[in-house]
Amino acid sequence: MKNDKKILHEIVKHFDEMNKIEAYDIIHKLETLLFYADNPLNLDNLIHIINSDIDSDHEIDPFHFTILPNGNFCEFIGHNNWIHIYKENKKIMPEWLLFDTYYYKTKYAPLELRKLTRKNLLTDIKDKPEERKVRTFLKKKRLSKKDIITNKLLILDDQL
C-alpha cells in the first residue's frame, strides 16, 4: 500500500493546475489504453498502442462514453467495425436537433475523440481501407444524414 501511495503521488503531480475535466479526459484515455494493453504492462507495448492502429478484434472504445473539455458528456450512439460515433449531450438547448454535435473515434486513433466533420474524418482515414468508400459516401450525403426508419447515421452502415 505504501508503494501505491508513492506511485499515486507521482501520477497526480502531472495533474497540478489542470482543470478537472482535462484530468477526467486523461484518466478515460488511460482506462482505454489499459483495456488494450498486455499483462503485465510493458512501456514499449503501451507506446505502440498509443501510436498505432488497434487490433480489429477489439472494440474501439469499450466504455462507450466520454467527457468533452467543456464539461458536456458524449453519449455513444452507434458503431461499425472502424468507427464509434458519439452525440454531445448539451446542457443548454438539449432537445434542439438542429444543434446536434457529433464526435467520433476510429480504430486508427482509439484514444482521440474528434468532432465529426468531413475534413476531420477524411484526414483521419487518409490512405486507409475505408477512404474510398467514405469519399464516395460524402459525395452523395452529409455526415449527419440518418436513416428515416432506424434513425441511425448512414455513415455507420457497414456496406457504405
Image (tube, grey):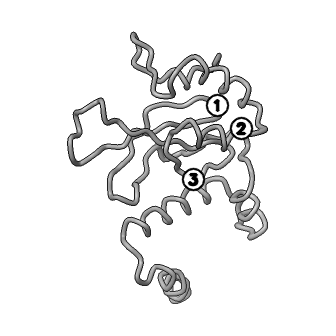
Q: CA distance from mark 1 to mark 3?
A: 17 Å
Q: Position of residue 126 (x, y in %)?
A: 73, 40
Q: Is residue 32 above or below residue 131?
A: below
**Residue position for label 2:** 56
The amino acid type, in three-letter code, at marker 1 is Asn
Determine the residue positioned at 59% across, 24% down: 138
- Mark number, residue 70: none
Q: Secondary structure at mark 3?
A: strand
Q: CA distance from mark 1 to mark 2?
A: 7 Å
For label 2, count other residues whose C-alpha is less than 10 Å away and answer few (under 14), some (14-19) or many (20+): few
Q: Position of residue 152 (x, y in %)?
A: 44, 21
Q: Position of residue 143 (x, y in %)?
A: 51, 28
Residue 19 falls in which quadrant of the image?
A: bottom left
Label 1 close to label 2 by CB (< 8 Å): yes
- Mark number, residue 81: 1
**Residue position for label 3:** 112
Please tell me whether mark 3 or mark 2 is closer to you in this view.
3
Q: Secondary structure at mark 1?
A: loop
Determine the residue positioned at 43% across, 84% down: 16
Sequence-earlier tag: 3 or 2: 2
Please tell me whether mark 1 or mark 3 is closer to you in this view.
3
Q: CA distance from mark 3 to mark 2?
A: 17 Å
The amino acid type, in three-letter code, at marker 3 is Glu
Residue 71 falls in which quadrant of the image?
A: bottom left
Sequence-earlier tag: 1 or 3: 1
Determine the residue positioned at 47% across, 24% down: 153
Q: How many marks?
A: 3
Q: Is residue 108 above or below residue 42?
A: above
The amino acid type, in three-letter code, at marker 2 is Ser
Q: Secondary structure at mark 2?
A: loop
Determine the residue positioned at 46% across, 79% down: 15
